[in-house]
């Protein structure tokens, strides 16, 4: 019998994890694997790009977990710089174009994996395509930014230069820090009441204050309307609706990302509210037995809210790939969903969240109480103790834990993992209080801050009654 053919569209975390797992289960004689990647790189950490830009990571190649050559050596026909233009589902084939040579051709498939990722949001503004305006979603994006910064045409000498970051989510905040490390004077413009919209505004206010203390000018409620350019078409400033102009030698877009699903939409595949592909627990696209999807192009089940959401994270993408590769390779695995855990930092400030924010809980129709406490990351008397703020949401009446947000010094962010486990297990805040967590003065107060927040949340639930 001829080998089946698995076609993978997208060569980063989800796509190549799926291809690699399928190859572990079936050899080339049983399963031919063809993978298409529009960029130059595969299996890389996009999350590490800000640290490369900021100089904490020495070079681009350190972000690459497995090169195209390494994938090919494992029996995967990986075609970089090749973009898939069309999905023909009835004909079970894809149309691709070699971006360097221009050749277009069709490739048939028995099984198909869509791992097309996400793309940076680029609002349709005058000047958005100007030289010096950069998004940083892919490693190719990061390389273009680094080439610009390091070239004579760009900003070889960055001391005293000005950078404007548009957006204050994870990407925006991390890129602001990276540019500070490079010697830029950094201004962050964002539309929300506080940076880090993944947090509630009161917790985002802590991030705002810390950024300003670090010398990052953070402007809330700023609606960008235009990128101003010079006579040569280079970005020179960012204009807002209020009439302010913020000078810029480089502009970085950190507005967020959206699922890259134009191919799927054109082929009539099912999409959710955010535009992400909808799959079942085995990551098969709903209604299509031999088509899988994973990574930043899909919506995932939020186990707390009980509905699908677009949560683009490399942790999820790699797990999706393992599940998909198992199914495509003849095995079995499922991806049950997520609780929305994410961590980040800006200079010395650590930021974490899991579960629902207040507006998420309201949108899900939940009645809830909140509890916020301030503590330290170690015993207060231990040298170097740093402040930490923990906010907890609990369902009114039942006391079920709904979400946790943490902002603080070193050792704060990873405490959110305790809350993530509690959320996944469906624990109440009263049960969280009873958790037997590790204690020693260098690591925690006698009462860990998460437990203190849970204890306060228990009181709030009891006070609220029915």
Image: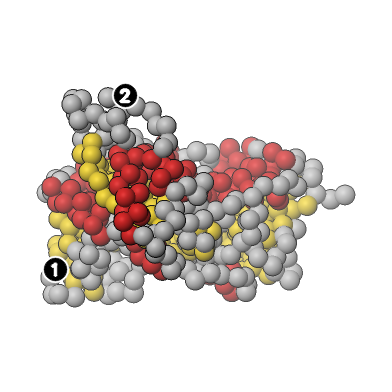
Q: Secondary structure at mark 1?
A: strand
290 left or right of 117? right
Between 171 and 143, the one nearer to me in the picture: 171
Q: Residue at x 35, y 49 (%)?
A: 458
175 left or right of 75? left
Q: Is residue 196 above or below residue 420?
A: below
Q: Residue at x 69, y 38 (%)?
A: 24
Q: Secondary structure at mark 2?
A: loop
Q: Is residue 232 above or below residue 442?
A: below
Image quarter of residue 63: top left
How far apart marks 1 and 2 lie (CA) works out to 51 Å
Residue 116 place in picture, x, y as percent: 54, 59
From the image, state whether disc 1 or disc 2 is nearer to you: 2
Q: Number of labelled discs?
A: 2
Image quarter of residue 232: bottom left
Residue 61 place in picture, x, y as percent: 43, 38
Furthest residue toward right: 1
Residue 197 place in picture, x, y as percent: 31, 60
Q: Which mark is residue 245?
A: 1
331 left or right of 97? right
Do callouts 1 and 2 mark residues in contact (Cβ within 8 Å)?
A: no
Image quarter of residue 45: top left
191 left or right of 38? left
Between 323 and 154, the one nearer to me in the picture: 323
According to the image, label 2 marks what residue? Answer: 440
Label 2: how many residues lie within 10 Å, few (<14), some (14-19) or many (20+)? few
């Amino acid at each position: 019998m001829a080998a089946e053919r698995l076609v993978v569209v997208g060569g980063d975390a989800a796509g190549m994890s799926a291809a690699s797992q399928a190859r572990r289960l079936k050899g080339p004689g049983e399963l031919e694997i063809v993978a298409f990647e529009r960029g130059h790189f595969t299996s890389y950490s996009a999350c590490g790009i800000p640290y490369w830009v900021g100089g904490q990571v020495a070079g681009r190649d350190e972000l690459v977990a497995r090169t195209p050559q390494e994938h090919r050596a494992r029996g995967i026909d990986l075609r970089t710089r090749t973009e898939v233009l069309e999905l023909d589902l009835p004909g079970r084939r894809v149309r691709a174009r070699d971006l360097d040579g221009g050749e277009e051709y069709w490739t048939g498939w028995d099984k198909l994996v869509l791992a097309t990722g996400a793309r940076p949001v680029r609002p349709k503004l005058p000047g958005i395509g100007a030289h010096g305006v950069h998004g940083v979603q892919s490693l190719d994006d990061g390389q273009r930014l680094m080439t610009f910064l390091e070239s004579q045409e760009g900003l070889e000498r960055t001391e005293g230069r000005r950078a404007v970051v548009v957006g204050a989510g994870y990407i925006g905040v991390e890129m602001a820090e990276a540019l500070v490390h490079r010697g830029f004077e950094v201004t962050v413009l964002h539309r929300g009441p506080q940076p880090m919209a993944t947090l509630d505004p009161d917790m985002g206010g802590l991030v705002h204050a810390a950024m300003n203390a670090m010398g990052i000018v953070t402007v809330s409620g700023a609606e960008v309307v235009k990128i101003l350019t010079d006579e040569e078409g280079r970005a020179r400033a960012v204009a807002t609706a209020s009439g302010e102009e913020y000078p810029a030698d480089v502009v970085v877009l950190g507005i967020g990302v959206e699922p890259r699903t134009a191919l799927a939409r054109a082929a009539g595949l099912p999409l959710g509210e955010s535009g992400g592909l909808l799959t079942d627990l085995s990551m098969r696209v709903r209604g299509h037995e031999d088509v899988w999807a994973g990574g930043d192009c899909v919506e995932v089940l939020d186990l707390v809210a009980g509905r699908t959401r677009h949560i683009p994270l490399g942790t999820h993408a790699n797990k999706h790939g393992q599940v998909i590769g198992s199914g495509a390779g003849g095995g079995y695995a499922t991806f049950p969903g997520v609780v929305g855990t994410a961590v980040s930092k800006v200079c010395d400030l650590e930021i974490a969240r899991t579960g629902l924010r207040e507006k998420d809980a309201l949108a899900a129709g939940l009645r809830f109480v909140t509890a916020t406490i301030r503590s330290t990351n170690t015993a207060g008397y231990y040298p170097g103790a740093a402040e930490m703020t923990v906010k907890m949401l609990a369902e009114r009446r039942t006391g079920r834990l709904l979400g946790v947000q943490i902002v603080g010094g070193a050792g704060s962010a990873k405490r959110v993992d305790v809350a993530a486990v509690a959320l996944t297990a469906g624990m109440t805040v009263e049960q969280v209080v009873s958790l037997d967590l590790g204690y020693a003065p260098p690591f925690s107060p006698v009462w860990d801050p998460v437990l203190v927040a849970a204890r306060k949340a228990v009181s709030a639930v009891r006070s609220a009654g029915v």
